[in-house]
Amino acid sequence: LPGVPYEMKDIFISEIKPILKIKNPQTPFYSKTIHTFGIAESRIAELLADISVPAEVNLAFLPQTGRVDVRVYGHHPDKSESLVNLIISRLENFVWGTDEENIAAILHQLLIKKGLTLSFAESCTGGLVQKLLTDIPGSSAYLKGGMVAYSNEIKNRILGIDNEILNKNGAVSEIVAIEMAKKTRQLFKTDIAGAISGVAGPDGGTPDKPVGTVHLAIDYRGKITHIKTFLIGDRSIIRQKAAEKLLYMIHEILLSS
């Protein structure tokens, strides 16, 4: 087939797929991907260890960037669906979506449903959190704005974080991430504000704050949540994991509120 992707796809759909269907009679096939977050693949395996996978059904663990997917597939839809329901019941607290759903889209729906507003201050992620949300049409209903507070000067001059706090603790610290969230919520007058400050690498790490150290903070109507995490990967992967982790955190907070 031609190497240009859009030509190849069009030819496959319009010409080749019909031929394949004629020459290969279809049998029922089921596939469902369960998205989890905040749980390791090994722990998922432990929780599902006593589950018997029926004949004609397959189970696969698919580690992704910052999360683990569990896929059930096979030629027996009823048995496959039953297994999916059982797995979701076992992993209930860690499941946030299925198939083509992504965390930004899930959070998008939740924020609109609850009528809440959102703002961000990002350092190492450089606006990636806001990009994930603004990729979705209609995000203006809740996302009021945000900023990339990359330097200490901007953290001080725009957000109003005291230079003494910045100099004493460093930008990548719990207190600075919390101050970023608090000041951002005040500045943008939103229900929720999220903040990220970290070391994405490949340089800039220290023995106390190695590459992959990230502080995430959320101010939800005055209630503060903070997490310090260590992320593995190159610069791009660390930034992606950090951005998605902040969205997962907000999603979890809203579900429990």
Image (cartoon, rainbow, N blue to C red):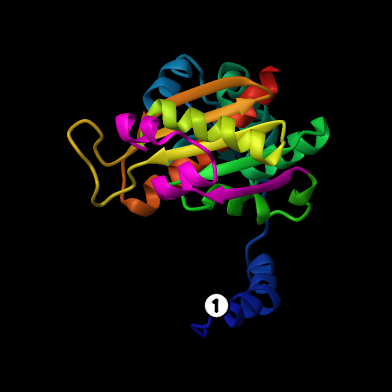
Quadrant assignment, res 137? bottom right
Q: Would residue 153 appear left or right of 111 to someone viewing this image? A: left
- Magenta highlight on residue 145: yes
Res. 58 visible in picture: no
Q: Would residue 211 appear left or right of 8 to someone viewing this image? A: left
x and y percentages locating residue 20 in the rendered image: 63, 69
Q: Residue at x 37, y 31 (%)?
A: 164
Q: Residue at x 52, y 85 (%)?
A: 2
Q: Is residue 132 above or below residue 115?
A: below
How many marks do you count on the picture?
Answer: 1
x and y percentages locating residue 235 in the rendered image: 34, 52
Res. 105 visible in picture: yes
- Closer to the camera in the image, 58 or 218: 218
Q: Farthest top residue?
A: 50
- Closer to the camera in the image, 179 or 46: 179
x and y percentages locating residue 134 in the rendered image: 67, 54
Q: Which residue is mark 1?
A: 5
- Closer to the camera in the image, 199 or 17: 199
Q: Amino acid at mark 1?
A: Pro
Q: Farthest bottom residue?
A: 2
x and y percentages locating residue 148 in the rendered image: 51, 51
Q: Would residue 170 appear left or right of 121 to someone viewing this image? A: left
**For the residue labelled by badge 1, is the local secondary structure a helix, a strand or a loop?**
helix
Quadrant assignment, res 221? top right
Q: Is residue 59 above or below residue 16?
A: above
- Magenta highlight on residue 203: no
Q: Residue at x 54, y 41 (%)?
A: 159
Q: Which residues are magenta?
A: 142-171
Task: Pick the quarter of the image with the C terminus.
Answer: top right
Q: Residue at x 23, y 51 (%)?
A: 203
Q: Is residue 79 above or below residue 109?
A: above
Q: Residues within 10 Å of mark 1 (few under 14, many from 20)?
A: few
